[in-house]
Image: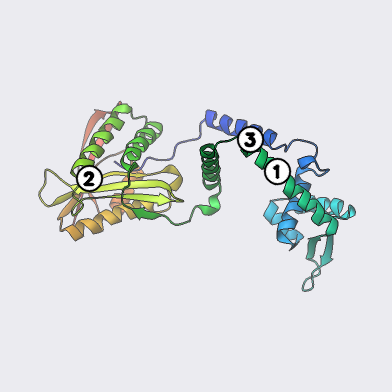
Amino acid sequence: MGIPRSATVDEPLVEDVRRFNRFYTKTIGVLEEGMLHTPFSLQEARVIYELGKLERTTAGDLASRLSLDAGYLSRILAKIEAEGLVKRQPGEDDRRRSHVTLTADGRKAFRKLDDGSRKQVGELLAPLAPDERARLQAAMQGIERLLDKSTDNEPFTLRGPRSGDYGWIVHRHGILYNREYGWDETFEALVAEIVAEIGRELDPKRERCWIAERHGEFAGCVFLIRNREQKNAAQLRLLLVEPGARGLGIGRHLVSECTAFARQCGYRKIVLWTQSALRSARRIYQAEGYRLVSEEKHHSWGRDLTGQYWELPL
C-alpha cells in the first residue's frame, strides 16, 4: 500500500489540547498572582530567568527569544530596572542597541526562581514510580518534537527490523488507514497476514525490510520481497510514512532503497499493488520510474476502491 494523506484536525482533539493546557497551567501555578511564591508575574519571571541563563544580551534579541512585543518587553524591563534587578547600557558598536544584564539583586531573584522551579518539579515527580517518570519524559519529548517545527528538517535513518517492529507495522497500518481513509479492521487483518508470511519466509539474501527512524522513533517502513507469481520479479509492499514525518523525503528514500537492492539481487522488475486514492504514494512511484500496468474496481475493507498494478523495469 502507499502513504495515507494527513488527516484534518477534529474538534475532540482541539478540546483535548485545550483541556491539557488548562490542567498544566493550573498544575505549575502559572495563573497565580506571583510565580513560585515571588512578586513577579509570569512574563517578568520569564525575562529574569532568560537573563540569568544568557548573562548578557540585547533587548531586541531578548524579545525575539521570548516571542514578546518589543514595546511590551520594554515596559517589563523598565519595571524591573526600577526595582534594581536589571541594568541597561548602550552598545559599544551601536548605541541604539542597549545591552541588558542582571544586577546582583537580579541574580538573587533569578536563583530564587530557578531553585523554586526545581523544587516544584521535584515535588511533582516525587510520587511517580521510575517507569512512570520515563513515560512522562517520553511523552513530553514527543509533544515537543511534534509541535516544534524547527526540527522538521532533522535527518532520519534507515535500519533493519527489530523485535516488535512487525507488530508495530500492523498496528500503524490499521490505525492510519482507518483514520485517514475509513478502511475497516479487515484491512488490518490483511496486513497482519502479509507481515506474518513475510516474517516466516523472509530470505535476507533476496528480500528485505527497511524501517525509517527519526528522533529514535518509528517514522516509516517498506518491504521488498520476491514475487511468488512472476519469475525474476520483486514486489514492493507496505510502504508507510508516519504523518509527523511526511514531507521529508522518507517515502522517496524507502522506495529508492528497494530499487537499489532489487538491482543488486538481479531482479528484472519490481511490481506493486496500490489504490488510486493513495495519491502521495503514486507520485513517489511515478518519480521512481514506475508505470501503471492495469487497474480494476473492487470492494474491500468497507470501501469501493480502484486497485492499480504498477511495475518498474530494471
Of tags 2 and 3, which is closer to the observer?
3
Q: Say few, some or many: other residues with alpha carbon within 10 Å of mark 3 (under 14 / 14 to 19 / 20 or more).
A: few
Rounded to the nearest angstrom, the CA distance separating label 3 from label 1 is 21 Å
- Residue drawn at (69%, 52%), measured in percent from left and top? 66
* Residue holding disc 1: 119
User: x, y (%) of residue 79?
Assistant: 86, 50
Horizontal arrangement in the rendering, residue 204 relative to residue 33 (left or right):
left
Kind of element beneath mark 2: strand
- Residue drawn at (56%, 49%), measured in percent from left and top? 148
Kind of element beneath mark 3: helix
Rounded to the nearest angstrom, the CA distance separating label 2 from label 3 is 45 Å
Q: Which three-letter amino acid code belongs to the residue tagged 2?
A: Leu
* Residue holding disc 3: 21
- Look at the image and tell me whether residue 15 can be seen: yes
Q: Say few, some or many: other residues with alpha carbon within 10 Å of mark 1 (under 14 / 14 to 19 / 20 or more).
A: few
Q: Quadrant of the N terminus?
A: top left
- Look at the image and tell me whether residue 69 can be seen: no
